[in-house]
C-alpha cells in the first residue's frame, strides 16, 4: 500500500511545492507529466484519494470529514516549504476546504489556492443537484465521464475497467454529498479561479468565488470545456499566477483582480509546462505510485 502523497519527480531542493487534488473519480495520472515541465524550483506533489492507483486496496473515504482529515495530515507532512494548492472540479472544493482548515489550525497555510472548473462552494447543493449525481445510472455516469473527456473509449469498452471507473466515481459523489461549507468561511491566501469558456460556469459564476478570500483574487477564462482543450491542459500551470516570477509587489502577480481571458499568443512564449498527454484516462489502479 502506498501513501497519499505522490512525488513523480522528487526535488528536495525546490523552493515551492505545487500540491494537486484530483477531480471526482480521478487519480493522479492526468497531473503526473507536469513534474518535468515545472520550473526546477517547483516540486509537483499529488494527493491520491483512497481506493485508486497505489491505494487501490485502501477503502474509499466514508465521508467528506474523513477525506479532509487525511488530506490535512498530508499537507502537514509536506514540511516547512511554501506550497500552492491546485484542485480541479471536485478537487477545487477539496483545495478550498483544505486551505481553510490549514489556516484555522495555525498553518502553515498555502501561499495561494487555485480552483479549476468548479462553482463556488456557496452553490455546492445546487451543483450536486445537477448531473452527474448519485441518482444517475451507471450508464449515465459513464456517458458524462466520456462526454467530459474523463473517460476514453478504450476504457469504456472493457467491462472490468468501466466498472472500476464508475465505482470510483460514485464513491467520490457520496463523499461530495456530505460537503457542507460553513457560511462566511473564507481563506486568507490569494485565490485564482480557472474555468473553461464552454463549461457550465460563466464569468459571473467565477466571480462568486471572490468573497471567499481575504487575499488577492483572479479569475481566468480558458478555451474549452470542463477539461479545457488538450493544448490548454498540457500547459495549465502556465496560467497559475502564483508560479510566475514575482512582480513588483512580490506576489507573483497573484494580487490582481478581475476576469481575464487566456492570451491567445501564449503559445509563442516560453512556457512552464510544455508536454503532457492530456488524453490519459485516470484509471483507478493501473498507475503505480512513485
Image (tube, rainbow, N blue to C red):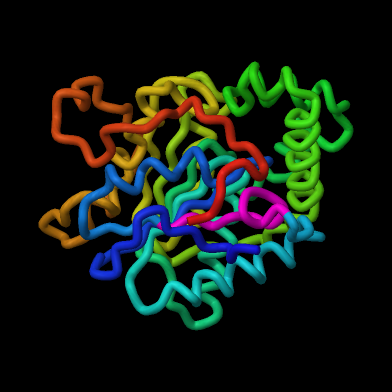
Inspect the magenta stretch and tell me whether residue 210 lies in it. no
Q: Residue furthest bottom?
A: 106
Q: Which residues are magenta?
A: 45-56
104 displayed left or right of 264: right
Left or right: where does residue 253 sit relative to residue 82? left
Q: Nearer the viewer, residue 281 or 15?
A: 281
Image quadrant where one finds the N terminus: bottom right
Badge count: 0
- Relative image position of residue 11 (x, y in whole percent): 29, 63
Give x and y (percent) for residue 25: 68, 41
Q: Residue furthest left?
A: 248
In front of the other: 190 or 204: 190
Question: Image quadrant of residue 157?
Answer: top right
Q: Nearer the viewer, residue 86 or 183?
A: 86
Q: Whole-percent x and y of residue 108? A: 43, 77
Write the residue at 62% across / 54% down. 54
Q: What residue sits 43% from the left and 21% below the top?
A: 229
**Residue 154, above or below 127:** above
Q: Is residue 46 magenta?
A: yes
Displayed quadrant of residue 80: bottom left
Residue at figure coordinates x 66%, y 57% from the top left: 55
Instruction: Confirm whether residue 130 shows in the render.
Output: no
Horizontal side of 84 relative to 250 (left or right) equals right
Amino acid at each position: 500500500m502506498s501513501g497519499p502523497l505522490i512525488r513523480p519527480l522528487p526535488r528536495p531542493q525546490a523552493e515551492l511545492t505545487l500540491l494537486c487534488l484530483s477531480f471526482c473519480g480521478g487519480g493522479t495520472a492526468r497531473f503526473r507529466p507536469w513534474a518535468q515541465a515545472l520550473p526546477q524550483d517547483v516540486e509537483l506533489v499529488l494527493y491520491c484519494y483512497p481506493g485508486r492507483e497505489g491505494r487501490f486496496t485502501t477503502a474509499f473515504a466514508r465521508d467528506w470529514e474523513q477525506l479532509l482529515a487525511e488530506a490535512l495530515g498530508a499537507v502537514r507532512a509536506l514540511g516547512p516549504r511554501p506550497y500552492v494548492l491546485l484542485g480541479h472540479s471536485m478537487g477545487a472544493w477539496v483545495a478550498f476546504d483544505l486551505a481553510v482548515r490549514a489556516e484555522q489550525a495555525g498553518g502553515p497555510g498555502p501561499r495561494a489556492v487555485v480552483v479549476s472548473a468548479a462553482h463556488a462552494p456557496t452553490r455546492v447543493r445546487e451543483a450536486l443537484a445537477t448531473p452527474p449525481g448519485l441518482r444517475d445510472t451507471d450508464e449515465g455516469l459513464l456517458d458524462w465521464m466520456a462526454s467530459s473527456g474523463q473517460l476514453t473509449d478504450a476504457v469504456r469498452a472493457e467491462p472490468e475497467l468501466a466498472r472500476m471507473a464508475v465505482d470510483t466515481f460514485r464513491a467520490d459523489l457520496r463523499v461530495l454529498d456530505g460537503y457542507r461549507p460553513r457560511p462566511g468561511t473564507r481563506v486568507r491566501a490569494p485565490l485564482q479561479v480557472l474555468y473553461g469558456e464552454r463549461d457550465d460556469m460563466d464569468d459571473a459564476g467565477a466571480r462568486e468565488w471572490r468573497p471567499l478570500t481575504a487575499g488577492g483574487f483572479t479569475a481566468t477564462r480558458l478555451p474549452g470545456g470542463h477539461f479545457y482543450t488538450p493544448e490548454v491542459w498540457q500547459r495549465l500551470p502556465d496560467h497559475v499566477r502564483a508560479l510566475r516570477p514575482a512582480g513588483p509587489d512580490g506576489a507573483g502577480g497573484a494580487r490582481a483582480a478581475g476576469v481575464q481571458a487566456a492570451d491567445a499568443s501564449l503559445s509563442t512564449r516560453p512556457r512552464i509546462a510544455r508536454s503532457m498527454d492530456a488524453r490519459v484516462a485516470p484509471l483507478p489502479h493501473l498507475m503505480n505510485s512513485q
